[in-house]
Image (cartoon, coloured by chain):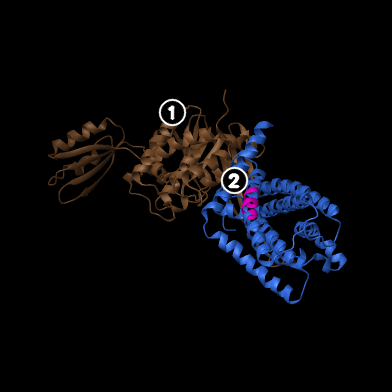
Amino acid sequence: MTATLRLFLAAAMARTYPRVAWLFRSNSWMIQETVLPVLAVAAFAYAYRAMNAPPAYTGFLVLGAAMTTFWLNVLWGMGAQLYWERDNGNLELYVMSPAPLMAILTGMALGGMTTTLVRATAITLAGVWLFEVPIQPSSWGLLGLGFVLTLAALYGLGMLLASLFLMWGRGAWHWVSLLQEPVYLLSGTNFPITVFPRLLALVASVIPLTLGMDAMRQVLFRTPGVLAVGIELSVLALLAVVFFVVARWALRYLERRAREEGRLSVRWQ
Amino acid sequence: MHPPAIRTHRLTRTYRQPRSRRWPWSPPAPPGGAADREFVALNDVSLEVQPGELFGLLGPNGAGKTTLIKILTTLLAPTSGTAEVDGLDVVQHAAAIRPRINMVSGGESSGYGILNVRENLWLFARIYGVPTPVAYERMERMLAVVGLTDQATSRISYLSTGQRQKMNFCRGFITDPKILFLDEPTLGLDVTSARAIRAFLRQWMKEKPERTLLLTTHYMAEAEELCDRVAIIDHGRVLACDTPANLKRQVQKYPLYELQLAPGTNGWQSLSQLPGVHQTAATTTPTTVELKVALTQESVIAAVVQALVATGCHILTLKKVEPTLEDVFIELVGHSLQDDASANTPARPALGEQ
């Protein structure tokens, strides 16, 4: 048991390393990954100002921009990553090794969270400073818990998507592309989800990003949300567990099927 | 009693390419119509490799070598038959097999370009649970073997194809596998590096006698030099499996000698009448007569020499022609590895076929 856990951690840390190394070695990323999202926020922020919207709305925008970076990382840095790993020949080395694929995915998630956290922090600081966002959290603890649970649920979903990519390759690519824009809308990246009809808001709450942002906005700006913060955090915790368990099962099942169908080492498909 | 390092029994692998349906509601293919296409990559392959053996797998492109390796490394499931590695079934006990094996494929592009050589090797050692100090110790040895120590801190995105191949070669050994699969390990390497790698392989096998190595290669000389036994595989079937010496013996039915004679005499023409001479063939050049003589038994060569001298022939050189593994391959497959894309390669001249 100890040896298994040690191997899991060693493999996860090893897979985290390339992403963290990228953070320090890729020089242009900070400009590309922070300035451009802040410009997108600026467009909406000035529109809200022109409409005399409450200042909290600008805060929604900044938080939305920061959290969206995690969603993009989950889609392309987690979901599609096994597809890339297969294409460059790393996947077969991972599958052939004694390390479980879940450890590799955990490493990708930890690495992705680290790099995206830096990016999200930069966006938040720039946004708060430029647009004078009024931050008055009701509880820093709840805010932190909401953030951690949102990331856990998001990256659990990412692991699930990764297992689908393992099986469907390019096919899954199209599905994930299709997910990207509707999720921007349904998660309320640029506006409070409460503007939706109640039923639509509840349906949209299945997306961890929606619930997480709604909970954090309630705590940060003391605005009303779709559900009470406690309920939203509980659902997020449940989603995290469900996604993780389903991802683990799906990964095993789809790895077995991929072995049977010869898809683990077939590239460019 | 140790189980065989590798054992396959009637192993078959079929790839099925489904007929694509344009829409989910498109009708399926009619029975006997344009149905799923099937390709048999391995057909009823039974092999046994003992612990400590350096076993070679030779075959043209598409023969099934890589498919066999992928099954043995738990990356691919067999369609039927069984495969065992270190006594464990590749389907039932894949997790137990994985810590014992590793694989290096020629021309693979694995690794992360943002990391340097050492960091990449460290990463792939850690997923096997190799402690960092041990990984670094093995790494330094392997980098020295392949002559990559100077590039150890270079990002792999800056390496040449050959240097990346060397790094991948190192990766296979850093986990100290009990059974190692090398799929064209010297592909694209310069002569000096390939020689250093072959020398290292022999040394590596000597260090721990229980280690087993399965090698596929396009270089016949490499297989001949390294392998204890060789299997020749084509169209998914094993055509022959034995030691290189036995395989060559099978293919050479008659001892063959090659003589160079000074020009000007024709005494060699009556040689085919001599008892014990199976066949002769000669090529005349302005400076020599190249004569090939196939004998029914070795001892007849003395009589051949005497007969040539008696008829006034001046023998410049005399050598026994040993068949190569290439000859065995051509005999079994019908063409050489170099021109395996050409299915209609003509057979060799009569004497060469021995």
Please state the chain letter of the residue tagged with numbered disc 2 in the rendered image: A
Question: How many residues crowd mark 1 within 10 Å: few (<14), some (14–19), many (20+)?
Answer: few
Indicate the amino acid at tag 2.
Answer: Arg
Judging by colour alone, the chain drawn in blue in this rendered image is A
The image position of residue B10, as x and y in percent, is: 60, 40
Q: Hue of chain B?
A: brown
The quadrant of the picture occupied by the C terminus of chain B is: top left
Residue bearing the label numbered 2? A15
In the image as oriented, which residue stretches furthest toward the bottom?
A: A50
Residue B49: which disc? none
Q: How many marks?
A: 2
Is disc 2 in the same subunit as disc 1? no
At label 2, counting other C-alpha atoms closer than 10 Å, the crowd grade (few under 14, some 14-19, many 20 or more) is many
Question: Which of the 4 image quarters holds residue A73?
Answer: bottom right
What segment is highlighted magenta in the picture?
A110-117
User: Is the C-beta separation of discs 2 and 1 under 8 Å?
Assistant: no
Q: Nearer the viewer, residue A109 or B74?
A: A109
Residue nearer the viewer, A237 or A1: A237
Tell me the subunit letter for badge 1.
Answer: B
In three-dimensional space, the C-alpha distance between marks 2 and 1, rounded to whole angstroms, equals 34 Å
Q: Secondary structure at mark 2?
A: helix
Residue A144 colored in magenta in the image: no
Residue at 49% in and 49% down: B108
Residue A116: in magenta span: yes
**Relative to the observer, which residue lies in front, A88 or A242?**
A242
User: Where is residue A143 shown, x and y percent of the image?
Assistant: 76, 53
Nearer-the-camera pick, B309 or A253 = A253
Q: Is residue B58 visible?
A: no
Whether residue A40 sits left or right of residue A52 in the image: it is left
Amino acid at pointer 1: Lys
Residue at 43 percent across and 28 percent down: it is B206
Residue where numbered disc 1 is placed:
B206
